[in-house]
Each structure stands twice: as C-alpha cells, then as structure tokens.
Amino acid sequence: MGFSFVYCVVCGCPFDIPPRDEVFDEEHNWASEDPLEDETKQWLCRIRLIGATSSLEKFTTPPFRMPRNESTTPGLFISDLADWSITEGLYFRLGGSSYRVLSSAKDTEDILFPLHDGCLTILQHVLTWRARLSPEGGSPPGLTSAYKALCSQFACNVQEKRRMAKESGFYGSTDYMEYGLEFDHGYYGARKFWVSEGWEPTKTNEWYCNDPINIHDLPDFIWALLAEEPPEDGREESTESNTNLEVSNLKKPLRSGLEQLPREILDFVASFLPTQSTLRLRMCSKTLMSRIILDQQFWRRQLLDGCVAPHAWELGDVDRYSKTPIAPNDKTLGHHNWEGLVRKLAQRDHIIKEDESMPPPPWGLRNRCRIWALATRLVTTSES
C-alpha cells in the first residue's frame, strides 16, 4: 500500500482534519485552536465511494463480499460511510475490506472514486435542480451520468500524464494525478494546496474546508440581506439585471390570446410557473410585460418554492429569517426587499469571492457555492 495523500474528486479537499501546528505562525494555521474538535470541519471525515457494481470486486482482494449499497440506481454503487487514514494511501476501508480508489483495473473502464458525503449531497441537489429545468419529456442527468463523467475525466488524466511523460522523458512519479482527479478548474483554488503530506493549512484557505451542509450562521446572513431597504414604492419592476437567473429567450412567440386573459387568471397561471418561465413569458410582448407584475409577493413565493437560489435549500422556511411580523396578504410583506434577497443569493460568484456589495457570507456558504459550481460543471459535462 502506498502512503499518498488523497483528495475529494468533487471539491478537492482532504479526507482528514489537519491538526494545529504550534511551530508555525497564525498565517500558516487555521483559526481554530483545535481543528480536530472544530464542528465545522468534521464533515471532512464523512466519506463515500462511488463506482459500478459490476466492477467493484476488481478493486479489493478476495474473498469478495458485496458491501452495502446506498444507491437505488441499477448498476451504480454508492458506499456506506468509509474509513481512511494517510497510512493507507489509495485504500479506503468498507467493513473489513480495503478498496483501492483512483486506479485502473483489468478489463474495465470503471474507476472507484472517493468523495465527501457532503459533496454527494450537494451533487444530488444540483441534479434535482437540473431536472426541474429540463423540458417535459426530457432525460435529465442522474448520478450515473455524473459517475461516467468522472470516469471520462480519469481517462483524460491518464492520457495527459502519458503525454507529459513522453515530452519530458521522465516516466517516474510526478505531482500530476498523484492525489486525485485533475481538472482545468483546479477545484476553484483548492488544487494549489495539495501536498503529499496532506492539506497545507493557511489562514486564507480554511473556508475551503468549512462544512457546506450545516451552516449555523446562515440565518444571520439572510437577515442581514433582508434588513436592507426595500425598493421605492411604485418604482417600475425590472427584468434587466447582472444576476444570472438562467433565463433564455423564447424562440416562438406566444399566441395573442394569452394577452387577453383577465389579470387574475394571468396571475394564477404565473403562480404555477418556475421563475425562469415567468420571466420568459413577460418578455414575449409589451402587453405581458405590463400585466405580469413581479412584486415582492412573487419573489418571496419563488424563494419559498426553491425556484431561485437552489443552493440555499434551507430557505423553504424563509419566514424564520425575518425578525418582524409578515402579513401574508400585505404586498410589502413586512417591508422586506425579497427581490433584492433573491438577486443577491443568486450571485454565487459574489458569495464565493466575498464581494463587497453584500455582508460577509458564512464560510460554509462560500464553500457550498464553490462546490455547487464544481458539481454543476460535472453535471454539465455529463450532459454533453
């Protein structure tokens, strides 16, 4: 068994918690006095393996006994929680057996990959969101598609490593592909902290390893966004924004009969549409633009239904983030700017970069947005 360090194929972070080293100064340590006891880091040790049931036996030693499979998709294997330590290198433990990850096996193109349980959760949320965006009758990607995309990336890594070896004339061990899958995106910054001895903690990279699932300070951040001044009364609602709400232009104009519907019926129809569909519908004509009003009730409803800011799935109970009473029939909805909240939460890039246009986001939310973007790229690759 090797003694190579291994990193998650989704987020690029480690599977253990780097201890504090008093030899180094504060700049080269995390803020936690004892990272091993920090509850925001425990998610790093919750590990899953994903692979194909047909080839699983090839990555362990006999006698083989099929481990528990958490997947309900035929042919796809998702392990129960696995164990790992640096002394085991590329081997992860399931029950009493060890399984080799990130390695080729004879007579198969399947690979066994390690990932965090939290990253799997975010990947599943992304897949659910993509399914909502898919046209009726379409075939949205699933976990099997994402797994195949990982296998394809592994094959590309192998070819690239061979090319690099041929060009350099050196066929020994190199940094490339030694610790995990390589991507052009570099895991949005996490790749540069990979070293053979483990993740290299610094004051500036701790947020990469903060729990992206249980974000305890998320309510305070939401309240800070909600507490901002609402739009001025009577101002014209706008559909133009730098925020990407994943809206594309309709290719066919709608029948003019829709424009003749009473306002109440139009509002009723729009209440059942996803945000993107409502925005596209408004852009079909000047008449619909003026008759379908995107008031604060609309934006709050979209937030409650999970139609916008899908990465903030806890907001189904958004009322608990408001510290003032909200009257359901009041168009001002407690004088909160729900549209502003939606548009700021939708700016995942701004959250990741801690943009000055909003209050400092929780580290866990920054990390979730980063992993969401990485999972989205993986899913998009599987669709092409």
Image (cartoon, rainbow, N blue to C red):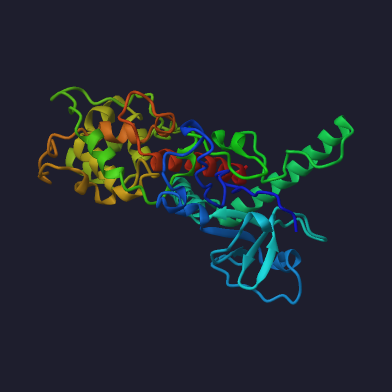
| Closer to the camera in the image, 258 or 202 | 202
Tell me the quarter of the picture where residue 222 sits: top left
Quadrant where the image shows the C terminus: top right
Q: How many marks?
A: 0
Choose top left, top right, bottom left or bottom right for residue 275.
top left
Q: Nearer the viewer, residue 192 or 375?
A: 192
- Most extreme residue toward the right, as rendered? 169
In the image shown, does 32 or 199 lie closer to the viewer? 32
Is 166 or 312 nearer to us in this picture? 166
Question: Residue 340 vs residue 24: left or right?
Answer: left
Q: Residue at x 62, y 53 (%)?
A: 147
- How far across and how far down the image is residue 25, in percent? 49, 33
Q: Picture coordinates of residue 357 (x, y %)?
A: 33, 24
Query: Split into 4 quadrants, where in the image is the N terminus?
Result: bottom right
Q: Is 161 situated left or right of 295 in this image?
A: right
Residue 331 place in picture, x, y as percent: 13, 37
**Residue situated furthest front in the rendering:** 23
Residue at 19 percent of width and 26 percent of height:
231
Q: Residue at x 61, y 42 (%)?
A: 381
Q: Is residue 37 visible?
A: yes
205, above or below 129, in the image:
above
Looking at the image, can residue 266 be seen? no
Q: Position of residue 372 (x, y in %)?
A: 48, 43
Residue drawn at x 76%, y 55% is: 109
